[in-house]
Image: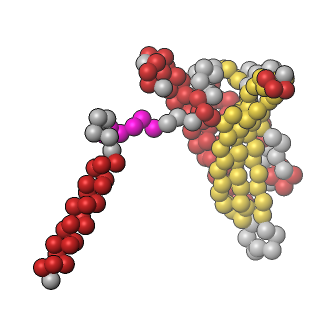
Amino acid sequence: MHHKCVMAMAVIAAGILAALATDSPAEPMLPRKPATGDDVISLAGIQQFGVTVAPFQPFLREIGMSAEPVRRRCIDLLEEAGYQVVKGNDQPYLSVAVRASTNPKLDIAIHAYSLETKFLQPIELDRLARTLEVPTYATSAYGISETKNLSAHLGMLVDARIKAFIQVLQQAEDFVNAEEADPHAR
């Protein structure tokens, strides 16, 4: 029994030594700053852009829903946060698409719905010698709702996704500003 205890302690000690040996003693063990992805960084410096909302599906229009109130809500939230929403073909723009579906075999009208947001920017692609409209940031969200609550649920989802997009815009700006303040942080 004594021999097994000594062996177990030896294995534990070897494991601790191996773990310590894998880290360089010359480098302090500090938490690393989380990496900011290129999709977020691509949004830095953006202060004005367009907003489009894809036309709603026929059955959404049949229950009284339309893209225009969603577009207006997006614009209101963005402008409240200090961004300028502009029109024009040469501008980056936020594209919003709402989709919903239902199963007609169910006794109750329940819809699965989604909201997709994409930020598209004109990007110069050297190898093709042309400018392309490329989504540089995209998110989506999903939910399920009864018909009577669908408009309210989509409204809450639009608010949440646009507010999250505003936070990402601010995060991109903060990241680039921090890099400019400390060029060695890259």
Above or below, 24 relative to 45: below
Q: Which residue lies furthest to the top in this view?
A: 181
Quadrant hosting residue 124: top right
What kind of secondary structure does the magenta stretch mostly adopt? loop
Give x and y (percent) for residue 23: 33, 44
User: Visible in this render: residue 165?
Assistant: yes
Q: Is residue 61 left or right of residue 147?
A: right
Image quadrant holding the N terminus, namely bottom left
Residue under the image location 30 percent in, 55 percent down: 18
Q: Does the magenta stretch include residue 153?
A: no
Q: What stretch is highlighted in magenta?
A: 29-34
Residue under the image location 75 percent in, 66 percent down: 109
Give x and y (percent) for residue 181: 44, 16
Q: How many marks on residues?
A: 0
Residue under the image location 82 percent in, 69 percent down: 104
- Say which of 130 and 94 sits in front: 130
Residue under the image location 69 percent in, 62 percent down: 146
Q: Residue furthest left?
A: 2
Give x and y (percent) for residue 100: 76, 55
Quadrant hosting residue 131: top right
Q: Which residue lies furthest to the bottom in this view?
A: 1
